[in-house]
Amino acid sequence: MQVARLVPLLGVTLLVASSGPAFPGGDEPGLPVSSLARWQNGRWQTWWRSDRAPQVWSEDQHVLTAGVAWAATAPAIEMAQLKLSGRRGAWRTRLVVVRLDPARLRLSLETGYGADGQPAWQADRVGTDVLFAVNAGQFVRTSPWGWLVLDGVERLPPGSGPLSTALTVDREGQVGWVAGDSIAARRGRGEVRFAFQSYPTLLRGGRVPEPLQRAGRGVDLAHRDARAAIGADSDGRLLVAMTRFDGLGDQLGFVPLGLTTPEMAAVMGALGAREAVALDGGISAQMLVRDAEKALVWSGLRRVPLALVARGRS
């Protein structure tokens, strides 16, 4: 087992493996050798390879949306599940995707702390009026990392780092995407009602950030884990994707095995996202989707301090 160490990258703490992966030939190391396949039409079909990874995702590359049976769980919310297979810990991966229309929903952020001051939010304990919920952002010890605005009040200042992105919800309910180095221009205007900041950015305008394309740019491109991400497609719909280990049944889906960061960027691009940023994954990743009869919950082992929730517009 590799021993991991923590290193800072321009204000962003990233996990870096102590021994490097094998890379394709060339003077400058590229991505770790990997591929992703999707179970479709009764067989595994490879749709992404590290040696042919797109730098920019275009409309004709949205291969994961082809043949997807979206199930409406509530007005303006639909869900799909796909089976993926990759190398090592990703050999059996279930991808849960939720697509939301923010124009028809009421989005907000919720914090959760216990009497002892420790994070206490869990997806399976939200109110019955919540139609969708997912853990939001990253966190440091007991606090969310980076910029946090709750009901128009800035609770935490922005974090620094070129690979960070903030998701904002204005007073009209419109969702925005702000690069980390552009947050300063949005502060203090009174137009943002909710905002959280996360990292690393997976897509910006459909383009994969340079540090996710080649090794040696400060990001561990080989580390595998359960992943969660949020993005937006060209129609402004939110896309939330979460991976679950699919090798030992639903009860052990929280096992922290899964995709690499470049592979998760590929997933978001192949789902049609133009903007995308990772959320806290591993044992923190958790999500709820409510339909007319029940709540579907993908639980995490760790309680978190912050969540994005969606309710119906009254």
Image: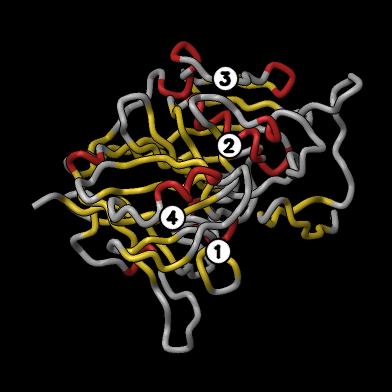
Give the mark, 2 or 3, whose residue is nearer the N terminus. Answer: 3
Q: Is residue 287 among the parts visible in the rendering? A: no
Amino acid type of disc 1? Phe
Mark drawn on residue 196: 4
- Which mark is nearer the camera, 4 or 2? 4
Give the Cα distance between marks 4 and 3.
25 Å
Examine the rendering and report whether any part of residue 232 can be seen. yes
Indicate which label's residue lies in the foreground, 1 or 4.
4
Q: Does label 4 or label 3 sit earlier along the sequence?
A: 3
- Decide which of tag 1 and tag 4 comes sooner along the chain: 1
Expressed as whole percent of the image width and height from the top left, the position of residue 173 reads 23, 46
Q: Mark 3 points at which residue?
A: 56
Q: The residue tagged with tag 1: helix, strand or loop?
A: strand
The local crowd at label 1, few if under 14, some if 14 to 19, many if 20 or more residues have their Cα within 10 Å, is: some
- Identity of the amino acid at label 3? Val
Q: Name the residue under label 2.
A: 264
**Image coords of residue 140 (percent x, y):** 59, 67
Q: Dot 2 surroundings within 10 Å: few (below 14), some, or many (20 or more)? A: many
Q: Tell me how far mark 3 sits from mark 1, CA to CA.
A: 29 Å
